[in-house]
Amino acid sequence: MSVTSTSVKVQYTGDGSTTNFSFPFNLLTDANARVVINPTDVVVYFGASGSEVVQSTSSYTVNGPSGSPANTVIFNSAPASGTVITIYRTKALTQAGTWTDGQPFSASQFQLALDKLTMLVQQLQEQLNRSIQLYPATTISGPVRMPDLVANNYLKVSSDGTKLIMSAT
């Protein structure tokens, strides 16, 4: 397999009757084109940004590329009308393949490892795309740390322009 999509998530709005929702991203497959799905490879959220709730894996099933229908989350019951549904691929930050000097080299196992690394990079890029970032030409050389949030305060830049601070005024 090769990773042919850069997507790691897709969103839908429930209509109260649809139970099947497709996703455009790849899942890992082994040399026999069987999907290698871990329970947390696909996470489903209900709710708008900031109020998302992770759905229990017992409320849906996931079909990979060889399933029918392929690359689909199938809910046991249709999400309510107006429900925002986010289907998100998330891979564990682990490395399962092992290679031993002098032993036969499994190209399919190596391909799986490369596919997973590509998926992890895509996952991190999606997270970076949602983050606040400094311009490449910034003169700030160290990390910009986020202070703990305090109720009824706001973030502001320190008077010397080097850090973020919480302020009541």
Image: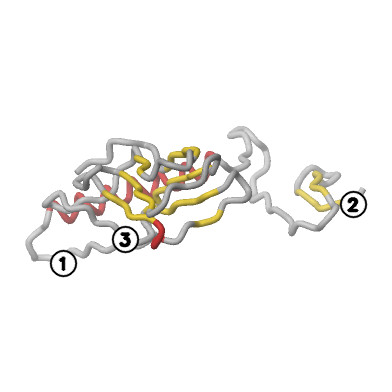
**In the image, which disc is placed on residue 38?**
3
Which numbered disc, 2 or 1, marks the residue closer to the eye? 2
Q: CA distance from mark 2 to mark 3?
A: 46 Å
Whether residues under marks 2 and 3 lie with C-beta atoms below 8 angstroms apart, the answer is: no
Q: Give the percent coordinates (x, y) of residue 33.
A: 15, 49
The mark nearer the N terminus, 2 or 3, is 3
Indicate whether 152 appears above or below 130: below
- Residue corresponding to mark 1: 100
* Left or right: 105, with 4 as reference point: left
Q: CA distance from mark 2 to mark 1?
A: 59 Å
Between residues 118 and 49, which one lies in front from this camera angle?
A: 49
- Residue corresponding to mark 2: 168
Which numbered disc, 2 or 3, marks the residue closer to the eye? 3
Task: Name the residue located 9 percent from the left edge and 65 percent from the top edge.
Answer: 102
* Left or right: 47, with 157 as reference point: left
Between residues 78 and 62, which one lies in front from this camera angle?
A: 78
Amino acid marked by disc 1: Thr
The mark nearer the N terminus, 2 or 1, is 1
Q: Residues within 10 Å of mark 3 (few under 14, many from 20)?
A: few
